[in-house]
Image (tube, rainbow, N blue to C red):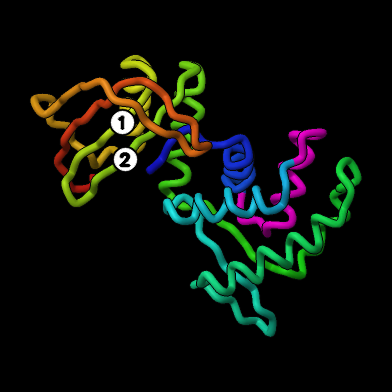
Amino acid sequence: MIGSLSSFQRLALDLLVNGPSSFGALYGFVAKEVDPDRPHVLEGFGAMVELASHGLVTMEWDVGGGVVRRGVDDIALRRLRDAYAEWLGAIPPGDLTGDDVSLDEVALWFSITESGRAAWSTAFAVEAAEGAWTLDDDCAGQALIIRAVDLRVAERALETWISLNPSLDPVPSSRGVTAESFRTNDGTVHQGIKLTLRYRKSAPAT
């Protein structure tokens, strides 16, 4: 599910669209942007793991000796989380500088995916509508499900998502709108609507 990103996730994607980043550098960037409301290290780490679980970013762990582990299991993630909490959590709020995070010896790296770029672009486009939303792309069923505070926000998210994914060929007759509450990534429950639309997959242009 792609939805209204948390402030940490939005800022993280702002950084990652320019290139990969270690979590230490990423956390330092976000902390500087939101100072003095610096998020807890565990909160930030959890936000990034959530993005990875939705396929918006990938994780790579540089374990040393030129070895990079692309598959990071739950046990390794807990070790990495605790290492970051011990390192970054020990720096007092307001004292975190670029020098503090210039060398990330824990070495968990994040990169944005194509889906992440699309979500980042969609978040920018829908931001002006000032409304919460989520989007699920049911690839198996070839259907988009958008939940939003109102139809205007849902339409904006749908329009932008389709423009960013030109291989999707919407089926207008399948469109449906119903009233439904929904939960965004920050846990907030909103009253709103659900917009569904089936699509066909067209062949990429050659």
Callout 1 amino acid: Ile
The residue positioned 23% from the left and 49% from the top of the image is: 139
Against 192, residue 50 (above or below) is: below
Residue 146: mark in rendering: 1
State the residue lying farthest toward the bottom.
Answer: 65
The alpha-carbon separation of the residues under discs 1 and 2 comes to 6 Å
Magenta stretch: give its range.
19-38
Q: Is residue 93 left or right of residue 127?
A: right
Against 75, residue 30 (above or below) is: above
Against 65, residue 117 (above or below) is: above
SS for callout 2: strand
Question: Which residue, given by chain and number where applicable, does mark 2 sit on?
Answer: 136
Callout 2 amino acid: Asp
Looking at the magenta stretch, what is its main secondary structure?
Answer: helix
Label 1: few (<14), some or many (≥20) within 10 Å? many
Q: Is residue 62 left or right of residue 123?
A: right
Label 2: few (<14), some or many (≥20) within 10 Å? some
